[in-house]
Image (cartoon, rainbow, N blue to C red):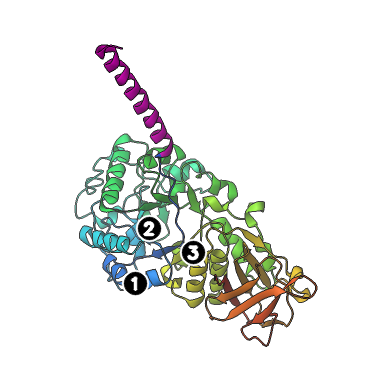
């Protein structure tokens, strides 16, 4: 082979190898969609305050933080860093500049950087359906010139309040109004390329600062077609989800083609029923199988979020204080869903124990153990047993009295000892003389069985040698 042909052959081999390598890289380099473990919802908290709380947030086991909308909104009549009275102002955008009531761009950057140093990621809440009520800006300029980004009427839908929430067209195109806000929130034409471009630029700015994902507010008020265009710029390694307050299962699932996850208000409704006096707690076994919850891979789960917390709205989903703790324990004890824990609940001892349990058990499968497989009296409507593989167990007792049995089987857990994460005592499991597994230690070596106090949740994790 002469030099000319040898050079051509060498070039051919190099080209083939390069193309093959490019194909391999193309097949393997796409980042897997981002997943979150437990999200701390820093609701209406100033960014500097959240930065100061990072050691406590990390110690409690949270590895994501969701912040309230960081952009410019109407000035508040309260101190946003110490009061939540006017929290809803944060959901009325004036501009997408990062000069809001909760802090400026540098405050946000400081929070993101400090969180990343601790291995914690940060999600930003974004509001793209509407702008702030014009009454705040009447002294600035005529509508809509007061809005720097959207100074033309063509960027907004016709000024008409939603009258029928069962009419999808009205829900997606008319203005959000309330008895206290008859003027309503100017509804953006999210179908317009210019509007989408400004929203893309805002998200890109946040990602350039280091934001790791997004919560999209009020997605029911934006068409699926528009939402698909809005989210198309988000990389796969970012975690994002939509706030869809679905009236039913199908309405919640409508947005899954657009978002990897949506808020699971179906589960909130199921939880509220299960913790009602006289209702069977075992109704919480596999609720997604009967469309009483969004499938776990598609769900952001909670017993309450800021919508159900807020005074004067969603009162049908508000829990008694003790029930709220137990409902949150259920959310954290099971495998399905990405739990979201509101600021006001995040540092309750049972919730902290559940957060750590969820983090340690995230890879373990789930099984609802029938109480009659444990003890005759354990098969009752006030108890729930959730096994996590053979390494973890959550027990919830919603009754007003202690459940106490001196002999209890534990067929699903491995032989060994388990630490309870809140009360810090040990449960041990071993084979009995009949070849079945029993709890032979419950706190004290002198007793076996189960003793769980009234309205209590326990989280057990296997002690690894």
- Which comes before the other along the chain, label 3 or label 1? 1
Q: Is residue 428 left or right of residue 191?
A: right
Q: Which residues lie in the magenta part?
A: 1-28
User: Could you tell which of marks 3 and 2 lies nearer the N-terminus?
Assistant: 2
Q: Quadrant of the N terminus?
A: top left
Q: CA distance from mark 1 to mark 2?
A: 40 Å
Task: Identify the residue under disc 1.
Answer: 55
* Identity of the residue furthest to the front in this view: 1
- Which of the two residues, 187 or 120, is positioned nearer the viewer here? 120
**Which label belongs to residue 181?**
2
Residue contact between numbered discs 3 and 2, judged by CB atoms under 8 Å: no
Viewer-nearest of discs 3 and 2: 3
List x then y, in percent, for residue 182.
38, 55
Q: Quadrant of residue 380?
A: bottom right
Residue 89: say if magenta: no
Q: Secondary structure at mark 2?
A: strand
């Amino acid at each position: 082979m002469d030099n000319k042909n040898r050079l051509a052959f060498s070039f051919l081999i190099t080209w083939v190898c390069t193309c093959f390598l490019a194909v391999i890289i193309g097949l393997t380099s796409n980042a897997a969609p981002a997943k979150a473990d437990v999200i701390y919802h820093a609701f209406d908290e100033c960014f500097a305050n959240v930065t100061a709380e990072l050691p406590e947030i990390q110690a409690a086991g949270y590895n994501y933080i969701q912040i309230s909308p960081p952009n410019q909104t109407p000035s508040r009549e309260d101190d946003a860093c110490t009061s939540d009275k006017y929290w809803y102002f944060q959901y009325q955008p004036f501009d997408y500049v990062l000069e809001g009531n909760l802090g400026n761009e540098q405050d946000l950057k400081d929070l993101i950087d400090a969180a990343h140093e601790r291995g914690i990621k940060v999600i930003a809440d974004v509001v793209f359906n509407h702008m702030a009520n014009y009454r705040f800006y009447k002294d600035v300029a005529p509508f809509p010139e007061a809005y720097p980004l959207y100074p033309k009427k063509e960027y907004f839908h016709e000024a008409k309040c939603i009258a029928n929430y069962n009419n999808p067209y009205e829900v997606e195109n008319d203005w959000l109004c309330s008895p206290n806000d008859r003027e309503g929130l100017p509804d953006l034409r999210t179908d317009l390329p210019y509007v989408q471009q400004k929203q893309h630029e805002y998200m890109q700015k946040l990602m350039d600062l280091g934001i790791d994902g997004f919560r999209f507010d009020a997605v029911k008020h934006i068409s699926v077609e528009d939402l698909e265009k809005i989210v198309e710029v988000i990389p796969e390694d970012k975690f994002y989800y939509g706030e869809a307050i679905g009236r039913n299962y199908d309405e919640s699932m409508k947005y899954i083609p657009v978002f990897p996850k949506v808020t699971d208000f179906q589960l909130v409704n199921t939880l509220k029923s299960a913790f009602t006096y006289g209702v069977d707690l075992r109704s919480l076994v596999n609720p997604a199988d009967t469309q009483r919850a969004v499938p776990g891979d598609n769900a952001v789960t909670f017993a309450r979020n800021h919508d159900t917390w807020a005074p004067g709205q969603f009162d049908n989903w508000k829990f008694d204080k003790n029930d709220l703790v137990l409902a949150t324990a259920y959310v954290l004890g099971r495998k399905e869903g990405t739990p979201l824990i509101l600021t006001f609940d995040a540092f309750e001892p049972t919730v902290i124990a559940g957060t750590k349990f969820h983090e340690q058990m995230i890879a373990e499968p789930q099984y609802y153990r029938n109480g009659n497989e444990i003890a005759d009296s354990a098969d009752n409507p006030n108890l729930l047993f959730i096994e996590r593989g053979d390494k973890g167990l959550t027990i919830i007792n919603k009754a007003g009295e202690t459940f106490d049995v001196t002999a209890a089987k534990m067929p699903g857990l491995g032989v060994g000892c388990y630490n309870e994460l809140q009360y810090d005592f040990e449960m041990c499991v071993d084979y009995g003389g009949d070849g079945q597994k029993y709890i032979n230690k419950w706190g004290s070596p002198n007793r076996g069985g189960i003793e769980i106090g009234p309205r209590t949740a326990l989280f057990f994790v296997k002690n690894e040698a």
